[in-house]
Amino acid sequence: MKFENLDLIAPILKAVAREGYTVPTPIQEKAIPKILAGKDLIGCAQTGTGKTAAFAIPILQILQKQRTEPRAKAIKALIVTPTRELAIQIDESLTSYGRYTGIKHTVVYGGVSQVPQTRALRAGVEILVATPGRLLDLINQKYISLKNIQVLVLDEADCMLDMGFIHDMKKILKLVPVNRQTLLFSATMPPEIIKLIKTILKNPVKVEVTPTSTTVDTIKQRVYFVERKDKKSLLIQLLKGRDIDSALVFTRTKHGADKVVRDLAKAMITAQAIHGNKSQGARQLALNNFKAKRTRVLVATDIAARGIDVEELSHVINFDLPNVPETYVHRIGRTGRAGTGGTALSFCAGEEREYLRDIQKLIGKKIPIVEQQNYALKIARK
């Protein structure tokens, strides 16, 4: 199937072609017709499967077909997402897919001055991308009204619940019209999501392109058993090799991310960190440098696991294994995007072996062990 077969309007087809897209991904092929038909939808898809386009394209088309005036009068579509990085990414996608439609959109998120955001809101937008906290803040200040919302999107819904946004989400849901179209996207489907679905979606159709807890098959996964004190040396050794073109390194804590960057700098390896203690400007600069390949290594906490979309990212390295197995799926999904290959390397210290067992149980496979390495953990086989 091609995009031309999805009953899309000419301005969107032109924009899609400009982006170099010819064939929709499975989630796009299944979701777009359902959304255009006005259905509530549950989208289960791994990161890197093109789900942003799966909801952005039909929303743009729905609003374009309704347009009677060139100037936006009210916000008609709201996309709520957990992190600033992901919000920015979605807004950029709306710019790409909607460049020939004239649909106005903007993004609001915390950690930066609200002045540019409120200026854009006063000028009028039809689609708003927002993180929950800043959205509620601007609603309280009377800059935003949700009374005209026709389409509500909850993106990375499992992550929003995981990050403690459930109370914010309940407040937001009370402010949008009951009669609306609701689209919920999630890479995993924990019990909390199922409970949420029953309260906010009406007769939803479910679109699932891969099992919700499996990893992308194109990603090559390996685990190194290593003493915690030797992780730094192992990472430096790997990064000094020629096999790693670009690497996104995950740590469990903000302090840990900063320490890794300092250790790499001492080894003459340039890296930048991205985490919640960094200003939005610093985070965006680090991300832009990484995307433009000015920085080869980006060290991140899990705030970045859903919000980084980097083309041709060769490696994800789990410096610390996550204690929540679903997080592993989200992390390694940063590589192997859109069907391309990628490699995920994980460092497992003795005290992290339980985390590894939980991850392997979730993904339904044993991750191969790298036997020949300089820092092998002696208890690896126990």
Image (cartoon, helix red, strand yellow):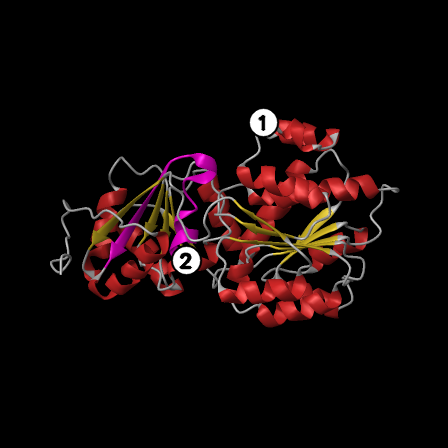
Picture layout, residue 227 above or below residue 366: below
Would you say residue 137 is visible in this rendering?
no
Q: Residue at x 82, y 48 (%)?
A: 72
Q: Are marks 2 and 1 in contact (CB under 8 Å)?
A: no
**Mark 1 closeness class: few <14, some 14–19, many ≥20 residues within 10 Å:** some
The residue carrying mark 2 is 327
- Residue 43, image x, y percentages: 57, 50
Q: Residue at x 58, y 62 (%)?
A: 111
Checking the image for residue 260, the label placed there is none
Q: Which residues are magenta?
A: 327-348
Would you say residue 192 is visible in this rendering?
yes
Q: Residue at x 41, y 40 (%)?
A: 336
Checking the image for residue 22, the label placed there is 1
Tell me the quarter of the image containing the N terminus: top right
C-alpha gap between disc 2 and disc 1: 31 Å
Tell me the quarter of the image containing the C terminus: bottom left
- Kind of element beneath mark 1: loop
Residue lying furthest bottom: 167
- Amino acid under disc 1: Thr
Query: Where is residue 51, by image quadrant?
Result: top right
Query: Where is residue 65, by image quadrant?
Result: top right
Picture layout, residue 69 above or below residue 24: below
- Amino acid under disc 2: Thr
Between residue 136 and residue 114, name the one nearer to us: 136
